[in-house]
Image (cartoon, helix red, strand yellow):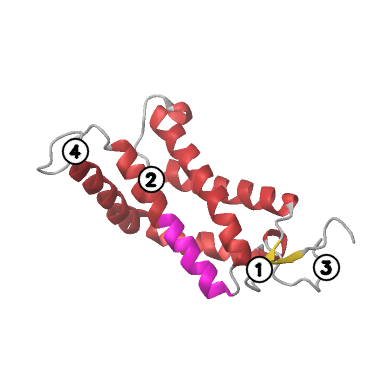
Amino acid sequence: MRAHEPVNYELAEGKVVKKIIARKFIFFAVVNWIMICGCIFLFTPGKSEGLLDPYLVSMYLLALLAVLIQYPFLQNAGTWKLKLLIFYISMVLFLFTVGVYFTWNESVGSYKAGTWDARYGGGMRFVYFGHIFGGWLFPVVVFANWTLRKRFFNDHPNENLNS
């Protein structure tokens, strides 16, 4: 068996889990991280420190974490409808996590700084405004992943995976 051929593992419950091929995983992570970092940079207000602003760096790292976590779920998703749902849930969780991180010791609305109500409110506001200002980029990210699906995922084990 060649290194580029997928290997399926059958679990005790009878489910088949697709093996993650390292080069596909790395290519997926790099392409998606660059797209998300571009979106972050596009929608982040101008900062004096440029690309190395601590807020931007933390968002870039959280984006990388989101991309790395979602790949195994995407790899094992059977249909593109399910993959679309995973992409959407990943986006919402990323926005919520960034919102909680940025409002950790900030007052949000009428909630006092440092309370879980303020943190939750900050996360929900990030989700809300992320949908309004950046939601139109979601189809672009999904379309790019669908276009590069043969290079990212082991959807078709009988096809040549190098193409």
Please provide the residue range marked out in magenta: 79-91
Q: Can you give x and y, in whole percent of width and height, for residue 146 in the image? A: 61, 67
Q: Indicate the position of residue 148 as horizontal and vertical percent values.
A: 66, 62
Q: In what quadrant of the picture does the N terminus appear? A: bottom right
Mark 4 → mark 2, Cα distance in angstroms: 27 Å
Q: Is residue 4 left or right of residue 139?
A: right
Residue 12, how many percent across, how many down? 66, 68
Picture quadrant where residue 49 is located: top left
Tell me the crowding category of disc 4: few under 14, some 14 to 19, or many 20 or more residues within 10 angstroms, Cα based: some
- The earlier-in-sequence mark between 4 and 2 is 2
Query: Label 4, label 1: how many angstroms apart (C-alpha)?
Result: 44 Å
Residue on which disc 4 sits: 115
Mark 3 Cα-neighbour bin, 10 Å: few <14, some 14–19, many ≥20 = few
Disc nearest the viewer among 3 and 2: 3
User: Residue at 46% across / 32% down in the picture?
Assistant: 57
Amino acid type, mark 4: Thr
Q: Which mark is residue 12?
A: 1
- Marks 3 & 2, CB-CB < 8 Å contact: no
Q: Which circle's residue, 3 or 4, is located before the other in the chain?
A: 4
Kind of residue at badge 2: Phe
Give the residue number, with chain letter if any, for mark 2. 43
**Residue, disc 3:** 160
